[in-house]
Amino acid sequence: MVLSARGLNSQLRIVSKASDRRLGDKFTRVGADAVVAPNELGGRRLFAEMHHPTITAFLESLLEPSNLDLHVREPTPASAHAAGGSGAAGGDSAALRRRAARVRQSRCPA
């Protein structure tokens, strides 16, 4: 499937699912840009939840934009320029840090 997709569109971003992380190398060799191993991700998530529950809850909240007024997106050179920023975050990084601090305070009571 990866070979077929790459043949149809050389600019396509291809993300493949591998049941075993060792298969990931095969997918990248034939043209996948990224490989996701759900079993490995699940194991890491379980470990993180056991050992770092507060941090895990915060990071999980970032993945649920419907629950927060915080939208994280991958910056592009055009969006950084349009926002008036020159850094990787594009825009006002101090404001982003303040908002992240408020989110942490609301999610992680002392």
Image: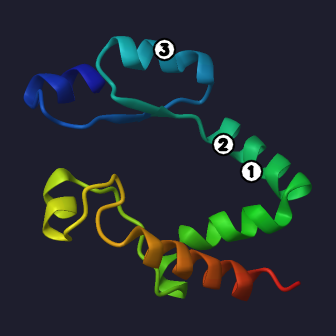
Of callouts 3 and 1, the N-terminal one: 3
Point 61% across, 41% down: residue: 38
Provide the secondary structure element on which disc 1 rests.
helix
Measuring from the top left, give residue 7's x and y in whole percent.
Answer: 12, 22
- Between the residue at mark 2 and the residue at mark 1, the CA separation in whole angstroms equals 6 Å
Point 68% across, 38% down: residue: 39
In the displayed structure image, the side of residue 19 where residue 84 appears, left or right: left
Q: Work out whether residue 65 or residue 105 is closer to the camera in this orientation and state it.
A: 105
In the displayed structure image, the side of residue 92 where residue 81 appears, left or right: left
Crowding at mark 2 (Cα within 10 Å: few <14, some 14-19, many 20+): few
Please identify the quadrant where the C terminus is shown: bottom right
Name the kind of residue labelled 2 in the image. Answer: Leu
The label on residue 41 is 2
Please identify the quadrant where the N terminus is shown: top left
Measuring from the top left, give residue 60's x and y in whole percent.
Answer: 64, 66
Compared to 28, does 78 lie above or below? below
Q: Work out whether residue 10 or residue 89 is closer to the camera in this orientation and state it.
A: 89
| Residue on which disc 1 sits | 45
- Between the residue at mark 3 and the residue at mark 2, the CA separation in whole angstroms equals 17 Å
Q: Work out whether residue 66 or residue 20 is closer to the camera in this orientation and state it.
A: 66
Q: Work out whether residue 65 or residue 96 is closer to the camera in this orientation and state it.
A: 96
Point 39% across, 18% down: residue: 28
Name the kind of residue labelled 1 in the image. Answer: Arg
Compared to 18, does 58 lie above or below? below
Question: Mark 2 near mark 1, Cβ–Cβ under 8 Å?
Answer: yes
- Between the residue at mark 3 and the residue at mark 1, the CA separation in whole angstroms equals 22 Å
| Residue on which disc 3 sits | 25
